[in-house]
Amino acid sequence: ICGGYDKHIPFDTLGDVLCQQAKAVVLTGATREAINAAIRNSVYFKDSEITIVIKPDFFDAVDTARKIAERGDVVVLSPACASFDAFRNFEERGNIFKNIINTMTEEGN
């Protein structure tokens, strides 16, 4: 899960790494389209090898990542951005992420 407050930094290197390492990327926050463009413009981009999903809402992004993940996969919150577009700070974002995951786990999802 990537995205957040736009500090106007380039995402080219991030796009390359995601294309080489990620099965899927769920993009959220103000930078979702910029990161999407960096992935699609990467020399390593192959449309059939990486799933890209855009979810403006953070809860929807986490839920979508959970639905995409298969047994043995790891869902990582690695925003590459500040949290100020939707949260007071990174701690609040991390705590909300943890609470969403814990709720899903308790519900058996």
Image (tube, grey):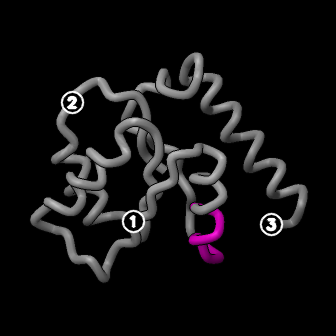
Q: Residues within 10 Å of mark 3 (few under 14, many from 20)?
A: few
Mark 2 or mark 1, earlier in chain: 2
* Segment colored magenta: 65-72
Name the quarter where the C terminus is drawn: bottom right
**What secondary structure is marked by label 3?**
loop
Vertically, is 38 above or below 91?
below
Magenta span contains residue 71 = yes
Disc number for residue 9: 2
Magenta span contains residue 35 = no
Which residue is nearer to you in this view: 70 or 82? 82
The residue that label 3 is drawn on is 109
- The residue sitting at the right extreme is 107
Q: Are marks 2 and 1 in contact (CB under 8 Å)?
A: no
Residue at horizontal 62 percent and vertical 32 percent from the top: 94
- The residue sitting at the bottom extreme is 48
Residue 50 lies left or right of residue 39; in this view the side is right
Residue at horizontal 82 percent and vertical 57 percent from the top: 105
The residue that label 1 is drawn on is 52
Percent of width and height locating residue 107: 89, 60
Vertically, is 19 above or below 3?
below
What whole-number distance in Å separates the C-alpha atoms at marks 2 and 1? 20 Å
Name the amino acid type tagged 3.
Asn
Q: Residues within 10 Å of mark 1 (few under 14, many from 20)?
A: some
